[in-house]
Image (cartoon, rainbow, N blue to C red):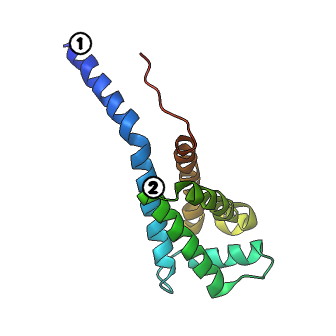
């Protein structure tokens, strides 16, 4: 019985080593693609207002309102497509690194509104982006040459 369990564990490890990072890449891509496409439809994204405010704040008012939301939609859609398809992946990962700075900046810029009297729904929405950042870091590490390795 122990041999069967060991064999099953070994098979699972091989499967995860081969498929976990590509699955994470595609899943992240679908999330970014979904969030990006929603922003093309006025009023469809719950993050539309915070995206506009964040871009406006980060660009010192140069880009604001609808332009900020469209910029965010294009960026997130591009990132999503690169992650899902694997094409232009390095370019998409650079765009993702830039986007992550913007995506996480409301934690600092609007902390009082997001977490002031307990965590708001928008605070939860922004905070979950920490998971996207760590997942993106794993995908980027593998895309840039890191490899999962099985111990022999």
Which corner quadrant of the image does residue 117 belong to? Answer: bottom right
Q: Residues within 10 Å of mark 1 (few under 14, many from 20)?
A: few
Q: Which residue is mark 1?
A: 2
Q: How many marks overall?
A: 2
Residue, x 66% and y 60% (percent of image)? 104
Instruction: Tell me the distance, in whole angstroms, between the alpha carbons under discs 1 and 2.
Output: 39 Å
Task: Please provide percent x and percent y for residue 83.
Answer: 47, 57
Q: Is residue 112 left or right of residue 88?
A: right
**Above or below: residue 3 compared with residue 142:** above
Judge by depth and name the residue closer to the eye, 87 or 63.
87
Task: Please provide percent x and percent y for residue 25.
Answer: 45, 51
Judge by depth and name the residue closer to the eye, 122 or 94.
94
Residue, x 55% and y 50% (percent of image)? 136
Q: Which of the two discs, 1 and 2, labels the residue nearer the N terminus?
A: 1
Q: Is residue 49 visible?
A: no
Residue, x 18% and y 13% (percent of image)? 1
Q: Which residue is mark 2?
A: 86
Judge by depth and name the residue closer to the eye, 67 or 82.
82
Task: Please provide percent x and percent y for residue 119.
Answer: 60, 61
Q: Residues within 10 Å of mark 2 (few under 14, many from 20)?
A: some
């Amino acid at each position: 019985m122990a041999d069967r369990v060991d064999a099953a564990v070994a098979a699972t490890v091989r499967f995860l080593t081969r498929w976990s990072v590509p699955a994470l890449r595609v899943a992240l891509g679908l999330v970014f693609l979904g969030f990006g496409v929603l922003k093309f439809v006025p009023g469809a994204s719950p993050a539309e207002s915070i995206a506009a405010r964040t871009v406006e704040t980060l660009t010192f008012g140069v880009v604001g309102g609808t332009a900020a939301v469209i910029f965010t939609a294009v960026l997130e859609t591009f990132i999503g497509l690169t992650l899902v398809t694997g094409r232009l992946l390095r370019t998409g990962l650079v765009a993702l690194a830039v986007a992550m700075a913007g995506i996480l900046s409301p934690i600092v810029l609007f902390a009082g509104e997001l977490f002031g009297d307990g965590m708001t729904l928008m605070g939860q929405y922004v905070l979950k982006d920490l998971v996207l950042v760590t997942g993106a870091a794993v995908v980027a590490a593998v895309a840039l040459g890191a490899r999962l390795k099985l111990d022999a």
